[in-house]
Image: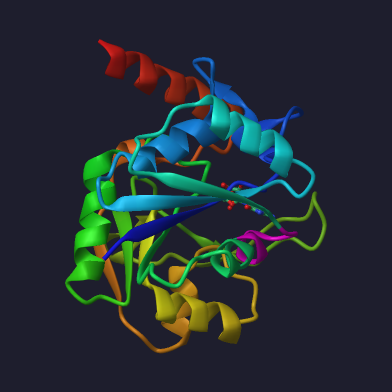
């Protein structure tokens, strides 16, 4: 069965500082989005990539993709995104042709995910999981706080979940198409990943090992790290 990847790339990237939309910023000269598209196309199973562009940037994204060669087996589509990540993914799914029964959702902000991670996610969906997430153990201890009412108010600690039971979740997340579409039609609360919507349907989400290089480029230091990883790959 052919596999499609939806890449939400419509975020502003405010935490990265002023500049172009995050997905269009370059890493070693190539836009982050292009790295992310190539990371999906690196899997031989992926034959369609749907890029969800900034609402006013669809034409620019289309010409970027035209300018950067993808493997011959891979087609792409560009659609304009929405106000939230969730909305952007939904707009991408609306463009998904019916023959794709497995769909990946991958953040443009994770440009360096290795192909082995992508293939491990695909494999677990093929084996029958309705939803699959790559995840890693945490280095930091995590505390739940009572969020401050105002910026200079204190944030009292509420709880410290057992770190051994926590995982940091990455993308691509993989789904049975019908399950993901139903999740997006049913769940209306604001969520930060797609698998959590499937959890809310009461279905099992399978975890496969993530990869350090699948980290999310969020803050300025992440750009430094991403460029160092790319430089090391060229050696
Ligand atoms: O904001 P966050 O880091 O969670 O964004 C994750 C991904 O979702 C990024 O690739 C970003 O471009 C995308 N996104 C989007 N539409 C939005 C907000 C974020 O496609 N409205």
Q: Residue drawn 31% across and 55% down?
A: 135
Return the residue found at the far front: 72
Residue 38 versus residue 32: which sits nearer the camera? 38
State left or right for residue 52 relative to residue 98.
right
Please determine whether, in this image, residue 87 is positioned above or below residue 232.
below
Please determine whether, in this image, residue 10 is positioned above or below residue 4.
above
Residue 193 versus residue 90: which sits nearer the camera? 90
Residue 164 versus residue 224: which sits nearer the camera? 224
Q: Residue drawn 60% across and 37% down?
A: 23
Q: Is residue 91 magenta?
A: no
Q: Quadrant of residue 89?
A: bottom right
x and y, in percent, of residue 121 in the image:
26, 58
x and y, in percent, of residue 80 in the image:
70, 53
Give the quarter of the figure containing the C terminus: top left
The part of the chain drawn in magenta is 82-88
Give the quarter of the figure containing the N terminus: bottom left
């Amino acid at each position: 069965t052919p596999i499609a990847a939806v890449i939400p790339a419509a975020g502003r990237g405010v935490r990265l500082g002023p500049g172009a939309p995050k997905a269009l910023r370059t890493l070693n000269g190539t836009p982050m989005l292009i790295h992310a598209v190539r990371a999906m196309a690196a899997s031989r199973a992926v034959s369609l990539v749907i890029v969800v562009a900034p609402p006013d940037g669809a034409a620019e994204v289309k010409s970027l993709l035209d300018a950067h060669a993808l493997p011959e087996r891979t087609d792409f589509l560009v659609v304009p995104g929405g106000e939230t990540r969730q909305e952007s993914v939904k707009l991408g799914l609306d463009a998904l042709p019916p023959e794709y029964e497995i769909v990946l959702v991958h953040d443009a902000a994770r440009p360096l995910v290795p192909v082995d991670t992508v293939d491990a996610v695909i494999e677990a969906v093929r084996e029958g999981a309705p939803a699959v997430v790559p995840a890693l153990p945490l280095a930091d201890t995590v505390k739940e706080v009572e969020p401050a009412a105002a910026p200079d108010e204190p944030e009292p600690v509420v709880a410290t979940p057992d770190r051994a039971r926590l995982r940091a979740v990455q993308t691509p997340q993989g789904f049975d198409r019908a399950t993901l579409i139903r999740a997006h039609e049913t769940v209306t609360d604001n969520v930060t990943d797609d698998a959590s919507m499937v959890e809310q349907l009461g279905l099992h989400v399978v975890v496969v090992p993530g990869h350090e290089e699948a980290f999310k480029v969020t803050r300025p230091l992440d750009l430094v790290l991403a460029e160092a990883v790319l430089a090391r790959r060229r050696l």
